[in-house]
Image (tube, coloured by chain):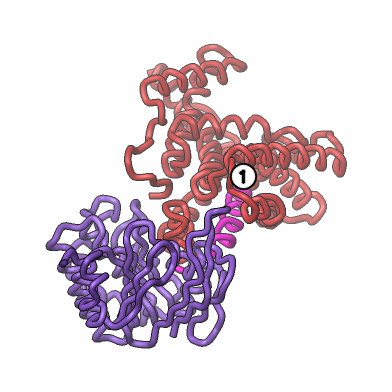
Chain colours: A purple, B red
Amino acid sequence: MLEIRQLDVSYGYLQVIWGVSLKINEGEVVAILGTNGAGKTTLLKTVMGLLTASQGTITFLGEEITNLPTFKLIKRGLSFVSEERNLFPAMTVFENLILGAYTVRDKKKINDALEYVFTLFPRLAERKNQLAGTMSGGERQMLAIARGLMHGPRMLILDEPSMGLSPMNVEAVFETITRLRSGQTTIVIVEQNVNTTLRIADRAYVLEQGRIVLEGTSAELRSNDQVREMYLGIC
Amino acid sequence: MEMLQQSWDIIVTAILRGGLYALMAVGLSLVFGVMNIANFSHGEFYMIGSYFAFFGITEFKFGPLPSIIFAGLAAFAIGMIVERGVFNPLRQKSKKGWLMNTFLLTLGVSIIMQNGVRMIWGSRYRGVTQFWPGRTKIFTSMEIANDRLVAFIIAMITITLLWYFLTYTRTGRAIRAVSQDETGASLMGIDLNWIHTLTFALSCMLAAIAGASLLSINPAFPTMGVNPLYKSWFVLILVGMGNIWGSIYGGLIVGLLETISIYRFGAGWQDVISLIIIILILLVKPSGLFAKKGVKSVLE
């Protein structure tokens, strides 16, 4: 579904991503793991057209999307929930959600999507008229994910969804992802919370200093000594 | 009783004056909030609005209202061309020093427009004597020219329509989204380039409507935009940069300050008095009267 071939990305003279290739199939949940500064977020932002690739190609649903402007990718069915969440703080929860369906013209579809995200996150339905900027971290993350689902994406990319959340909220976020995978949404998840992530993901790639150093099914990675040592803290 | 009557006159005059400042300031604020541009060519769109209304009446024989609408639409089109031709290319190239560079660009646009108009149409005054003949008495005291009254009503209707557009329509919401979080907006599938062009054009249209509806009171000439530009900057600085709804109150406040100082100290003192009071207010509230802490919000 999404295929990245030999991708290089640089910030000015500083190259951050080195020849990364990966493939994500329809219906999978794929994790991208790695320590701070390994280039995970850079990789995702390049896929989303927020950063420019200097080399390599990205294809989505069989069409090349390398360096296309972000708003065009949304129309093609990609959705990105960034680490910063990028909510609209002075708008209500409802308005944020409606904007999530900006590319959808069909009123009925928008209402269905609203209903769907309200069943996923009943809390958002209660807070419908609250300003997004006044919500707690957990609620904001829920809103960001819900907003990312509003246009009915084929693939949802989550950047550190558990970042800055209390353990209870982390649990809730992962529960949501498990529920989403039973739908038809393909999910790519970047996480530092390796243990939990490997429990819900089908496959994972491990990124280190801008290169893919390991890949395999979650079970394989969980039994891999290097991963156990570096990320799971089990020696 | 006479005191009361006088205060009433002052308030009515202030509101009529302030309504048009508000219309100018709202456009300026919109561009600052959404595009982060300190637009010093805003007055020139007021000026061409005035010219377009003049030609609408004299050349095309439109009525007053169609002329004003024509002026607004023409300025909208010119605003689109200016944005695509000047700010958009810079945006694609580099956002370094954006605020300063765009400020200089708007100064350039202002000079080009002023002198372009002088070249094409000369520098003589072009005005019409009346849009809507007659005067109206509001609560017995003084008589107000109908033109002033209608200009105020047009300003209020325009602001109301803008408010509705920004609050309830899909595109209006997109404009607010861009002002609050650009990355977030593009992740919603919003084309930032289009929203920027539209915002700039809308702002030009608002200025042009202000200029056009005052044509019978202020005739058109190339440098007529300077004064309204300064007035709308007074308003913006007073209420806080980029606070578009605050600009409406700001317009009325500046209108009131000016009217009182003209009444008390005579014409010519109004800028001195209103600036002194604005400075005093800024000493107490440096980020403006309606600035909010924390949330970076422009369009609420």
Is A218 included in the stretch rendered in magenta? no
Q: Residues within 10 Å of mark 1 (few under 14, many from 20)?
A: many
Q: Can you say whether A35 is above or below B1 in the image?
A: below
Magenta extent: B188-206
Residue B64, given in percent of the width and then of the height, sits at 68, 50
| Secondary structure found at label 1 | helix
**Horizontal arrangement in the rendering, residue B245 relative to residue B191 (left or right):** left
Q: Quadrant of residue A112?
A: bottom left
The residue shown at (21%, 54%) is A136
**Horizontal arrangement in the rendering, residue A32 relative to residue A219 (left or right):** right
Q: Quadrant of residue A1?
A: bottom left
User: Looking at the magenta stretch, what is its main secondary structure?
Assistant: helix
Where is mark 1, residue-wise?
A: B207
Residue A222, given in percent of the width and then of the height, sits at 21, 76
The amino acid pointed to by label 1 is: Ala
Quadrant, the C terminus of chain A: bottom left
Q: Chain of mark 1?
A: B
